[in-house]
Each structure stands twice: as structure tokens, then as C-alpha cells.
Image: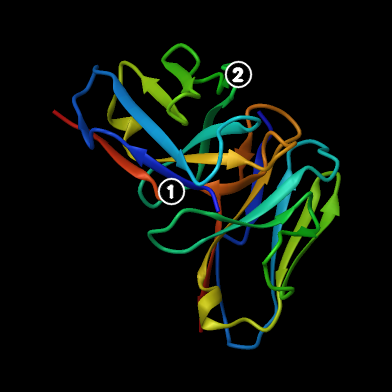
């Protein structure tokens, strides 16, 4: 059973860059699409973007200028960097795996990493 | 972006009831909808994919239907463990988008 685990700084200052990593265990990162999804407290889900194990990425248009995703197959992990953060980026950030042979059916999720943007 | 309008935003029903949630897409999206359950403090969990296919290991009390712009998610024999927020998600076009969620409570 694959397991995903996000790690991140917790607290980030406005205008800085938040970096999150999703470590994949119990399965290979190879052959799958991996996404980041966030959820502000008490609100709904927002898809941020996805990356294939090969490194090919697609981003949400509203975040494209601030977002970078990368994958490290040797470490079986993938990462997100979001720059110029504001309070609006405060949320729980989830990493998720799409089922094999699909791009957008999220069958495995991390437990979430809370990012608070505050000075 | 495709908007997914989910209703109701919340509902309260009795144990044993049948509960229905709807999701309307802002444009036709074939059957490209998934449904998730999210319990408080937890990550979402996939229940239904491609509008009507039950994810492996998910009880048959959950079901989905629909195509085009209108989709329905149903829980039969509601139980206390079904208390959660339920989300639809479209994957016809990027960016992927979710409905606003339906919070299901026990009366």
C-alpha cells in the first residue's frame, strides 16, 4: 500500500517562498502522475498542478507564474515551490497520486501539511 | 475553468435515510467526474470514479450517476460513520476543479 507524506516549514513570511516535499513509500514514483491540492481552513479543495515521474508538469493557470514542481525519482519524492506567498496561500497542502493509467483520479493522499503565511 | 456547482452545501438526515447530492458542471463534461469523502481532519478519500464506478473497497451504499452537466451522488442507509464532507471533481479540462462540498450530518 503506497503511502504519501508531506513535509514543509509550517510558517512562512509574506513574500517568501514555501517549499513542500512529498515522500512516497511502499510503492514507486515511476509511472504515475502526482498532484498538489490545497485546502484553506474550512474551505474547499483547489488543485494546484501535477507532475509526471518524468518531470513533465502542468500548473493551475492562476498560479503558473509562482509555482514550480519537481520530481526526484532517486529519492522517490516530488516537491512544490510557491513563491511570493501571501495570506491567501495559507492552507493545508496535500500531495496525491493519480491511479495508474489515469492523470486525475486521486486514489492515494498524504495526511496534509499546514502552511501558515504570517509575519 | 469549469465550475462545479454542488448542492446542497449542507444537509442533516436521520440514520437509515437515503441522501442525494448533486453536482452541476458549467459545461458538458461527459462522465468525467469523481466523488470524494473527507472526514474532519483527514485527507479526502476516493469513493466513485468516472461518475458511477465504485472504487475498490468502498461499500455499495455509495453510488453515483450522471453524464453531461448533471451528476448525482447517493448514500443509502445513512450511518454515523458517513458524517463527512463530500466533493465532486471534474477532470474533463485543466485546471481540475472541485465542487464546493456538501457537509452531511446526522439529525
Q: Which is nearer the eye, B24 or A46? A: A46
Q: Crowding near pointer 2: few (<14 within 10 Å), some, many (20+)?
A: some
Residue at x-position 58% and y-position 86%: B14
Q: Secondary structure at mark 2?
A: loop
- Tell me if I can see residue A92 in this picture: no
- Tell me if I can see residue A48 in this picture: yes
Residue at x-position 55% and y-position 23%: A60
Horizontal side, residue B4 vs residue A101: left or right:
left
Quadrant for the N terminus of chain B, please: top right
The answer to which image quadrant residue B58 occupies is bottom right
The answer to which image quadrant residue B4 occupies is top right
Residue under numbered circle 2:
A54
Residue at x-position 28% and y-position 31%: A87
Report in which chain the residue with disc 1 lies: A
Residue extending farthest to the left is: A119
Residue under numbered circle 1:
A43
Q: How is the image coloured?
A: rainbow
Q: CA distance from mark 2 to mark 1?
A: 32 Å
Q: Secondary structure at mark 1?
A: loop
Locate residue A2, reporting x and y percent: 53, 48
Amino acid at each position: 500500500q503506497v503511502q504519501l507524506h508531506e513535509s514543509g516549514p509550517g510558517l512562512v513570511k509574506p513574500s517568501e517562498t514555501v517549499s513542500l516535499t512529498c515522500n512516497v513509500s511502499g510503492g514507486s514514483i515511476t509511472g504515475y502522475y502526482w498532484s498538489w491540492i490545497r485546502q484553506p481552513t474550512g474551505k474547499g479543495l483547489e488543485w494546484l498542478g501535477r507532475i509526471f515521474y518524468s518531470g513533465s508538469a502542468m500548473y493551475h493557470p492562476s498560479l503558473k507564474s509562482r509555482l514550480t514542481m519537481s520530481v526526484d525519482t532517486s529519492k522517490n519524492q516530488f516537491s512544490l515551490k510557491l513563491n511570493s506567498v501571501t495570506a491567501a496561500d495559507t492552507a493545508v497542502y496535500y500531495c496525491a497520486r493519480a491511479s495508474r493509467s489515469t492523470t486525475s483520479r486521486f486514489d492515494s493522499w498524504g495526511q496534509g501539511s499546514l502552511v501558515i503565511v504570517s509575519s | 475553468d469549469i465550475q462545479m456547482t454542488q448542492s446542497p452545501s449542507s444537509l442533516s438526515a436521520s440514520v437509515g435515510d437515503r441522501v442525494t447530492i448533486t453536482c452541476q458542471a458549467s459545461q458538458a463534461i461527459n462522465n468525467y467526474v469523481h466523488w470524494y469523502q473527507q472526514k474532519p481532519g483527514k485527507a479526502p478519500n476516493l469513493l466513485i470514479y468516472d461518475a458511477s464506478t465504485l472504487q475498490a473497497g468502498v461499500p455499495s451504499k455509495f453510488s453515483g450517476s450522471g453524464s453531461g452537466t448533471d451528476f448525482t451522488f447517493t448514500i443509502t442507509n445513512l450511518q454515523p460513520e458517513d458524517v463527512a464532507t463530500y466533493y465532486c471533481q471534474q477532470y474533463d479540462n485543466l485546471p481540475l476543479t472541485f465542487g464546493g462540498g456538501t457537509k452531511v450530518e446526522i439529525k
